[in-house]
Image (cartoon, helix red, strand yellow):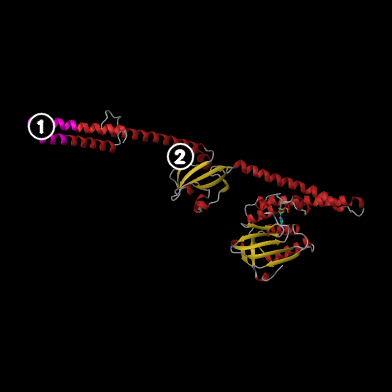
Amino acid sequence: MPPRIHVAWTRTLLQLAAVLTGAAVVGALVGEVWMALAIGALGVVAWHYWKLYDLLRRLTSRSRVPPPQGDGVWQETDRLLHRGQQDMRARKRRLIAMLRAYRAVAAALPDAVVVVERNSQRIQWFNTAATTLLGLRMPRDIGKPVGPTLQPLPVAHWFAHGRRAEPMLDVASPVSSGTRLELRLIPYSEDLWLLVARDVTKLVRLEQMRRDFVANVSHELRTPLTVVHGYLDMLDPAEQPEWAPMLQEMQHQSQRMTQLVEDLLTLSRLEAQDSIGEETVSMASMLASLRRELTMLSQGRHTIGVDDASATDLVGSPRELHSAFSNLVSNAVRYTPAGGRITIRYEATAHGVALAVEDTGYGIPAAHLPRITERFYRVSTSRSRESGGTGLGLAIVKHVLHLHQARLEIDSEVGRGSRFACHFTAERVRPREAAYLGATG
Ligand code: ADP
């Protein structure tokens, strides 16, 4: 026991002893010792009960306990209560200050932050930027359902996806269609979700400028290149044999540049699209055309196989799909040494269908795979250049597949070969028309 409490107890016991002694003396004087002692003891008990009652009353009324005077047990109890109350008040003040600071930080954020109650989907709180970016008004919109309040933003449908909701990367602000927003849903506790909206107008504009620039430059290069290419084609190396190697190199390089410009234009066109045509793509014709291209590019250097194992067609853009598949075929030919085998396989999978181009070529080291579909990313620049690559083939494949909600799966082993499989979901698959059933390329 702490010394203070020890002293308080001793003092209280001494008080009891003093009262009882006083009562005994008075009792002896009047000849009623036991009666006087009983009255004294009852008085002490009554006084303690009264103090207990007083303490309970003060605790329940939450009134402030005054700083204690004296040093009995009750004063000691008061002292402890007074200290507890003061600690609690200081902690509360600190917490309120912290809460205010957090609110001030959230309120000052340039991004709109809206706290939404998960089950009712009602708005609980929002910051100042939510007023400028989303048009929310304080206090009008507190407690309102978030979906209808933020219309025409497709937020309600987004909430239905819950934790799996993908961020919306470029949507018009309900306040002004010129302001572009990136919206994210962050479930930060069981009951509360954060809706964060960031102004990406400048970023979107910059991205658009970059796309326009690449598209314009490519477009402007097309005409002069066609002219140079045309004149080079007219020059006959046989007429001036000493110029022959240079002419050949010039023709080769101008062809490469033309291909590069065409690929850049294709990428710009793909980037500008949000969705793709919904035509039925005859896969029997597609495979036949890919086989022809493969045969022509390979020029008898490889063993060729086409396996049409799924009696289905695809829904999408025939032109873009053809461009993606033929890029894979061209890569297989360019990165497979003579004597290798190249197979195009169209088959059903657990979730739809896949068109795969397999080769027994050089293969790709695993470290390069995560970046292989980036523009101009090459495993070996010299090998790619020698083979006439532009470095844009797989970027085109990725974009085309993305527009078809499909994905590219790459399996590769150095020295053994590669498999590039385009996986399409069941929504993109249709049964093949009877006329084409059984046809293989
Ligand atoms: P490139 O025009 O250089 O071929 P791509 O985008 O088509 O550009 O391919 C990127 C890189 O991926 C290539 O430079 C090459 O290193 C590698 N690659 C693509 N396809 C194959 C393949 N079938 N076998 C081995 N490597 C490949």
User: Which SS class for mark 2?
Assistant: loop
Q: Is residue 282 visible?
A: no
Decide if residue 205 is on the left or right side of residue 101.
Answer: right
Q: Which residues are magenta?
A: 17-43
Q: Is residue 440 above or below residue 297?
A: below
Q: Is residue 154 above or below residue 295?
A: above
Residue nearest the observer in this picture, 204 or 115 = 115
Quadrant where the image shows the C terminus? bottom right
The amino acid at mark 2 is Met
The amino acid at mark 1 is Gly
Q: Is residue 102 one of those drawn in magenta?
A: no
The image quadrant of residue 33 is: top left
Q: Which mark is residue 27?
A: 1
State ligand 1's quadrant. bottom right
Q: Residues within 10 Å of mark 1 (few under 14, many from 20)?
A: some
User: Which SS class for mark 1?
Assistant: helix
| Discs 1, 2 touching: Cβ within 8 Å | no
The percent coordinates of residue 370 (x first, y second) are 65, 52
The percent coordinates of residue 258 (x first, y second) are 78, 51
Q: Is residue 226 above or below residue 59?
A: below
Decide if residue 7 is on the left or right side of residue 292.
Answer: left
Residue nearest the observer in this picture, 45 or 249 = 45
Q: Is mark 1 within 8 Å of ligand 1?
A: no
